[in-house]
Amino acid sequence: MRAPQHILETALYADDLDRAEQFYGGILKLEKVSRVADRHVFFRCGQAMLLIFNPAETVKPSHNPDMPVPVHGAHGAGHMCFAATGSQLDDIATSLRQGGVAIEADFQWPGGARSIYVRDPAGNSIEFAEPRLWGFDETIANG
């Protein structure tokens, strides 16, 4: 088997999907792809998907034989990181502040890459970082 080359989707969990939708769709401007009641809301992020699930709903088994998705869920704060160039990070910081989002940390790593950390409404740790943090070319930050 060849090692996977791309993460297709990332999942975070939030009890309040309305607040999650406002944060990811409203403040971060991600494109909402779908929402199913109080179960989940899905967003497109470049060539990947960000899935926000309500953990109280995803622990219930599927009753649709055409979509036998196993039960899943997590409790407690998760973490994810969005790729961004240095100039994009300045714009992101401004948008976050204008949206009333407190920045927990904004710093340069020893290798020179910059990261900004915030919390989403569910308490998940959300990072925005230059791809060089992991040795990637910054072109991945542009989709």
Image (cartoon, rainbow, N blue to C red):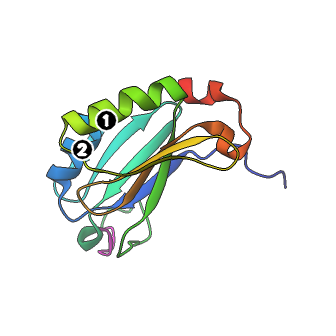
Outermost residue, right side: 1
Please give the range of residues in magenta. 58-62
Residue 111: % across, % down: 70, 45
Q: Residue at x 52, y 33 (%)?
A: 84
Q: Does residue 105 sit above or below 97 in this rendering? A: below
For image coordinates 24% across by 44% down, the residue present is: 23
Can residue 29 be found in the magenta stretch? Answer: no
- Tag 1 and tag 2, C-beta contact below 8 Å: yes
Task: Kindly identify the amino acid type of the residue bearing the numbered disc 1.
Answer: Leu
The quarter in which the C terminus is drawn is top right
Q: Is residue 70 left or right of residue 43?
A: right
Residue behind mark 1? 28
Quadrant holding the N terminus: bottom right
| Left or right of 47 in this view: 104 | left
Number of numbered labels in the structure image: 2
Circle 1 residues within 10 Å: few <14, some 14–19, many ≥20: some
Q: Secondary structure at mark 1?
A: loop
Q: Earlier in the sequence, mark 1 or mark 2?
A: 2
| Amino acid type assigned to the residue bearing label 2 in the image | Phe
The residue to which callout 2 is attached is 23
In the image: residue 117, left or right of residue 140:
left
The x, y position of residue 89, in whole percent, is 45, 32
Spatial distance from mark 1 to mark 2, Cα to Cα?
6 Å
Q: Residue at (68%, 38%) from the top-left corner?
A: 132
- The residue at 63%/38% (across/down) is 131
Question: Which numbered circle lies on residue 14?
Answer: none
